[in-house]
Image (cartoon, rainbow, N blue to C red):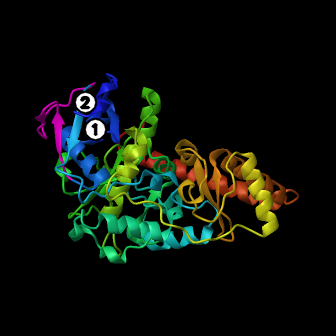
Amino acid sequence: MSSLVSEPVADTHVRLIIASDALWLDIPYTILSFLCLYPVKYFRYLGWAILGLQGKVYYGAEVARDDATVVSGETYELRTENMDGAAPVNVDVSKKKTESITQTSRRENLRRMVEPRDGRCIFTGAPPEFCDAIHIIPFARGQDWFESIVRSRRDTTQSDLEDKPLDDLELDSASNAFLAFKPLHGLIDSRWLAVLSVPNPVLTRDDIDTSIDPHRERDGRVKYPTDRSYILQWLKLPDDEYDRGQYLRVASNNSLAAFAKDTPIPKPSPLLLHYMYGCTAIRCWGREHGSMSNLPGFVRAPEAAKHTFGSPTKRSSQNALLKRRGLGDPGPFGSSAETTGSSMSEEEQDHEQWRTSDSGAIMRVDDEFDDEFDRIQDLVYMLTLRGRPELCKAIEAEKKDYDERLEAWREGVMTANGEGS
């Protein structure tokens, strides 16, 4: 057994060692019990999603059966015959938002690709005006890194469940996106939620206690796929029971996706969803994952093209502000601590964000700067509207209409599910 076992496991958690002395997951038992009917089998899926390899789960010196009861406060270990052929996830992929806040044209183009296929939120049935088109692999990582991920995982996936040849997958495409209720967008970006695609080399739909909205099931405009299923899972929930209930009202655990009927548009790629599921599991439960970069097959960030932000004078003032924030020179687009020689720690890199301007230029900022950037945008917005009462009234009326329609939709869903008073 790995030396990682020496650290105590909380009585409320179960520990799964994924790679000896490189990564383990401390999974809340209450969360685990809802994700899969067979937790040991789910452990094997986590290992495959994270490493790209199948293995056996050991409890002590014995191989644990898939249907064995998992004991809270205990440690389990995934063991593979060897690491040859491994394609471990790079969790940094999940540390960027799934889409630009300001790059409107790109967001609208992606929406045009997926809305005919999805119709509305694929998990909740929320009308399209309350939905966002969400990238699976965040667009900020760029096409080069996207292609590296696909190449590294092409031998681990089931190509017959892909609607497009793997060589034809693109970052900005329907295969890398879906339509989701706006509140889900932030939760997916925060890595509280992940989408499980079944069947896969480990799990089938029968292993998951899926939730089907009866209101959607009667909707003749949508259809649940028969050859595969897309299942929305909560990997993180608030500890407070009331708060947890409120989150689950947004979307039930193990909600099943439905799509518009008879559309030829490719559905979301299982390969990409499995990769992001592995990243999300590490973000939620991972411990000691810094050394994963030493594992065979680890895909590092590709060297980025050199783009700069603004004029030399503007860049100088922005660089000075970034340095005052302790970030140093932001450098070329896509540069990381590894390629620029920055002294930023892994924790500091975890707080980085990419900010895209209206012109399409991109710079790197941290969370604190990101918040200030938003405040500046709000101030500019407020000053722009000053002295234009008619425009202010129009915007307020539009917001009020949006809120009323959203509340009407929510009440309709609750009534259809028998939750109304």
Quadrant for residue 419, please give it.
top left
Q: Secondary structure at mark 2?
A: strand
Compared across the picture, whether 12 is left or right of 44 comes to right
Residue annotated with mark 2: 75
User: Does residue 344 show up magenta in the picture?
Assistant: no
Image disc number at residue 330? none
Q: Amino acid at mark 1?
A: Ile
**Residue in front for this viewpoint, 1 or 257:** 1
**CB under 8 Å between callouts 2 and 1?**
yes
Q: Secondary structure at mark 1?
A: strand
| Residue 169 in view in this figure | yes
Residue annotated with mark 1: 17
Q: How many numbered marks appear? A: 2
Compared across the picture, whether 377 is left or right of 221 comes to right
**Residue in front for this viewpoint, 247 or 204:** 204
Instruction: Report x, y in % for residue 225.
Output: 25, 63
In 3D space, how far apart are the residues under numbered discs 2 and 1 (Cα atoms)?
8 Å
Q: Amino acid at mark 2?
A: Thr
In the rendered view, would you say 303 is above or below 386? Answer: below
Q: Which residue does the image show at 28% across and 40% down from the upper left?
A: 20
**Residue in front for this viewpoint, 300 or 134:** 300
Q: Which residue does the image show at 59% across and 55% down from the upper left?
A: 341
Q: Which residue does the image show at 37% across and 54% down from the upper left?
A: 89
The crowd level at tag 2 (other Cα within 10 Å; few <14, some 14-19, many 20+) is many
Instruction: Report x, y in % for residue 86.
Output: 27, 57
Q: Which residues are magenta?
A: 54-73
Secondary structure character of the magenta stretch overall: loop
| Residue 263 in view in this figure | no
